[in-house]
Amino acid sequence: MDNRDYKKCDHGLVIVYTGNGKGKTTAALGLCIRGAGHGNKISIIQFIKSNWPYGELEGLKRLEPEVKIKTLGAGCIGLPGDNKPIEEHQAAAQKAYLRSLEVIEKNEDDTVVLDEINTAIGLELITVDELMRLLDKRPAKMNLVLTGRDAPKELIDRADLVTEMKEIKHPFQDGYLGKKGIDY
Ligand code: ATP
Ligand code: MG
């Protein structure tokens, strides 16, 4: 610590977890556990992700009703097994976007997590202008956590806290599939 006069932070924070390394979504979920321990109300809205048995979906049920999660994506684009037309991904992203706007404007939560929203922007499923509108509507006391690779510069400029996960090693490089309880 230096001798500056540090102050208590009473306003909400815009927090971004980005980069190619693993840990963005799990960092956001970690904040939810921490907030829940203080009785905070939290909404998580997932872009891109669809019907995969992510452990957090069951795990977070233990934190209901304070913590709520809604998965509104249509799955990863371009991976083997994705045979959906782009319109379906666009419609899913639009639905997740409108839900995010609604949750933010309702102002009932201490923290709102928009998981994989950066990925949705990178895939041009939602626009940077739409993202800016979400930030504009954020009540001053609400924390907004945004995850996903390739966070746009406009978001980084407006955020209070940005962490870039950097890949040093991952079992995927050695040919391992995602591991239950670690990757999903
Ligand atoms: P996590 O959900 O594990 O915190 P993440 O949010 O940082 O990962 P995403 O890009 O959302 O990363 O990852 C999608 C999936 O790929 C997850 O199952 C994740 O665990 C896995 N993953 C993340 N980073 C890597 C990586 N560098 N190499 C291989 N797989 C990864
Ligand atoms: Mg993620």
Image: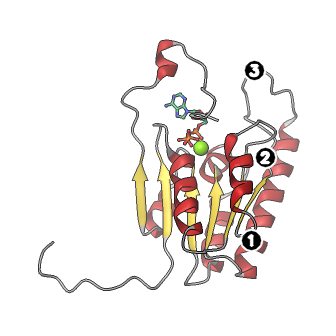
Type of the residue with mark 2: Gly
Q: Quadrant of the N terminus?
A: bottom left
Type of the residue with mark 3: Pro
Taking the image in four quarters, ligand 1 sits in the one at top right
Residue drawn 52% across the image and 60% down it? 31
55 in relation to 133, above or below: above
Which is more toward the observer, 175 or 118? 175
Q: Residue furthest top?
A: 175
Residue drawn 60% across the image and 72% down it? 135
18 in relation to 35, above or below: above
Could you classify mark 3 by the number of other residues whose Cα lies within 10 Å: few (under 14), some (14-19), or many (20 or more)?
Answer: few
Spatial separation of the CA atoms under disc 1 and disc 2: 16 Å
Q: Quadrant of the C terminus?
A: top right
- Reading the image, the residue beneath label 3 is 80
- The x and y percentages for residue 146 are 57, 58
Task: Tell me the number on the disc at residue 101.
Answer: 1
Q: Is residue 154 visible?
A: no
Task: Tell me the number on the disc at residue 73.
Answer: 2
Secondary structure of the residue carrying tag 1 is: helix
